[in-house]
Amino acid sequence: MVAGVAGCARKNLTTPELYDAYCTRCHGDRGQGDPRSLTLYPRANLLASPMALRGDRAAIRERIAEGYGPMPAFKRRLDPQEIERLVNYTLQLGHPGHPGHPPKETP
């Protein structure tokens, strides 16, 4: 985890590092959400998010930038390109071959 990176030379962060620094705490390392808070915040599970499931890039971009409910706004912490990279990353969560996708179990 890239803790403490927020506000520091983040321009060199890869997209997975951005996700780890800004999103993992609530959304989990694979987008599954923090099991301890899913009862209160079921939308923290990005794998079941209606916006992600329908591929609504504009809605995801707005949610990251503006926040909503318990989710903070990131428009002052991330530039538009970083937000766009996180939109792409969010839409790929749960897809085979994605860095956040669990490896296939072999018998």
Image (cartoon, helix red, strand yellow):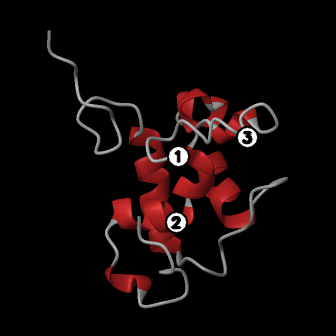
User: Measured from the top left, where is residue 47 in percent x and y?
Assistant: 53, 31
Q: SS for tag 3? A: loop
Quarter of the image for the C terminus: give it: top left
Residue at numbered disc 1: 28
If the image is split into quadrants, where does the N terminus sit?
A: bottom left
Mark number displayed over residue 83: 2
Q: Amino acid at mark 2?
A: Ile
Q: Going by the picture, which residue comes out furthest to the bottom?
A: 9
Disc nearer the start of the sequence (3/2): 3
> 84 or 104, which is in the foreground?
104
**Residue 37 numbered tag:** 3
Confirm whether residue 54 shows in the render. Answer: no
The amino acid pointed to by label 3 is Ser
Mark 3 and mark 1 lie on one chain; the one further toward the N terminus is 1
Q: Is residue 84 left or right of residue 36?
A: left
User: Mark 1 is on which residue type?
Assistant: Gly
Q: Mark 2 falls on what kind of element?
A: helix
Q: Position of residue 83 (x, y in %)?
A: 52, 65
Q: Is residue 68 above or below residue 90?
A: below
The structure residue drawn at horizontal position 73% and vertical position 40%, both measured from the top left corner, is 37
The kind of secondary structure element at disc 1 is: loop
The reply to whether callout 3 and callout 2 are in contact (CB within 8 Å) is no
Q: Nearer the viewer, mark 3 or mark 2?
A: 3
2 or 1: tag closer to the N-terminus: 1
Q: Residue 57: x, y in percent?
A: 55, 46
The residue at the point 64 percent across, 59 percent down is 64
Identify the disc placed on residue 99: none
Q: Residues within 10 Å of mark 2 (few under 14, many from 20)?
A: many
